[in-house]
Image (cartoon, rainbow, N blue to C red):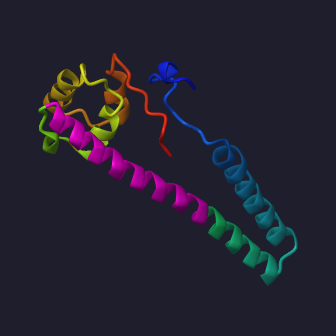
Amino acid sequence: MSDNAQSFATHRRYYWPYHFVAIPILALNLIVRIVFVVRWWSWANLWEVFVAIGLIALVASTRVFALTLQNRLIRAEERARFRDLGIDASRYSTNQLIALRFCADEELPELARAVAEENLRSREEIKRRIRNWRPDTLRA
């Protein structure tokens, strides 16, 4: 995706090996393991259900860990950007800062003021209000 093409409608990022290969295969594996344990009961088949659940938990946890780290980095970057623009970042939650990262510098003071005054909490609601989109193509 080109930097100019990113907008509210196109900003979601899917990493195809994760979203369209690993997750579906692991989900299908769990279903198959459950069918096996129901049709051909054995402790070994039951153990395979537990392993399948463990694999899904492991993959989901790695995604959560990556997103948590990404959010901490975005929060730090946005606090620095707010400071450079003379905006008090302490008034904003992490979720608000994460949503505001897409807002261009020239629009940020106005939108940040609206977010604080109207107590907007939803990332989606904040992102919908951005008129001049600043692409973020390096996220997890």
The quarter of the displayed image where residue 90 is located: top left
Identify the residue at horizontal 56%, vertical 58% (top origin).
60
Residue 84 horizontal/vertical position (percent): 17, 35
Residue 114 horizontal/vertical position (percent): 18, 25
Residue 117 horizontal/vertical position (percent): 13, 29
Identify the residue at horizontal 15%, vertical 27% (top origin).
113
Q: Is residue 67 left or right of residue 60?
A: left
Q: Is residue 131 above or below residue 112?
A: above
In which quadrant will I find the N terminus?
Answer: top right
Magenta part of the chain: 57-85
The prevailing secondary structure element of the residues shown in magenta is: helix
The quarter of the displayed image where residue 55 is located: bottom right
- Say which of 43 and 138 sits in front: 138
Whether residue 32 appears in magenta in the rendering, the answer is no
- Say which of 34 and 14 sits in front: 14
Whether residue 84 appears in magenta in the rendering, the answer is yes
Q: Is residue 73 above or below residue 2?
A: below
Identify the residue at horizontal 68%, vertical 73% (top origin).
50
